[in-house]
Image (cartoon, rainbow, N blue to C red):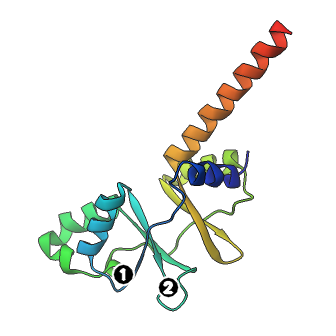
Amino acid sequence: MKISDILRHKSAAGAGAVVTLRADQTVQQLLAALAEHNIGAVVVVDAEAPEKVAGIVSERDIVRHLAHAGAETLEQRVADLMTTSVLSCTSSDSVDSIAETMTAQRIRHLPVVDNGRLAGIISIGDVVSSRIRQLEHDRVQLEQYIAG
């Protein structure tokens, strides 16, 4: 199974759009986007090239900054919180290899970048759901084979 399969499934379920922000937006705007879309991370894009990933910001990043700087964090720019060395994957990567990477690196959200352009985002929940669907498919195939 490939990452493209996960993206296709998300799109069919109406969850294929990637929520993005620019680095110059405020943390308050970031929080509003997270709440509005019920998501745990936002991809930060380049202002001049919105298809290019500039960073990523997660709920965890916000909590850490709040613990350190307090309420003034809300007035900071997304650029002050975002991770700029972003690990990403491509739609042709295997789900198994990306699951290993996400687990080893303790990453919950991974942008999907094809040919330098943002193509989607996957979460560890998407990976787990994909594996469950695959196991269910395999179970049905085995039952049909046995019932033959």
Give the side of residue 86 with respect to residue 131, left or right. left
The residue shown at (69%, 55%) is 4
Task: Tell me what residue is drawn at x 70 percent, y 28 percent.
Answer: 137
State the separation of the CA atoms marked 2 and 1.
11 Å
Badge 2 crowding class, 10 Å Cα cut-off, few under 14, some 14 to 19, many 20 or more, is some
Q: Position of residue 14 (x, y in %)?
A: 51, 53
Seen at 49% across and 85% down, the residue is 46
Q: Nearer the viewer, residue 124 or 100?
A: 124
Are dots 2 and 1 in contact, CB under 8 Å? Answer: no
In the image as oriented, which residue stretches furthest toward the right? 148
Helix, strand or loop under label 2: loop
Name the N-terminal-most of marks 2 and 1: 2
Q: Where residue 123 sits in the image (x, y, percent)? A: 51, 52
Where the N terminus falls, by quadrant? top right
Residue 4 versus residue 62 in the image, above or below: above
Q: Residue 37: which quarter of the image?
A: bottom left
Q: Position of residue 127 (x, y in %)?
A: 58, 45
Residue 46's mark? 2
Which quadrant is the C terminus positioned in? top right
Question: For the residue marked with disc 2, what is the amino acid?
Answer: Asp
Q: Which residue is mark 1?
A: 79
On screen, residue 72 above or below 127: below
Outermost residue toward the bottom in this view: 48
Kindly identify the amino acid type of the residue bearing the numbered disc 1: Ala
Image point 60% across, 32% down: which residue?
Answer: 132
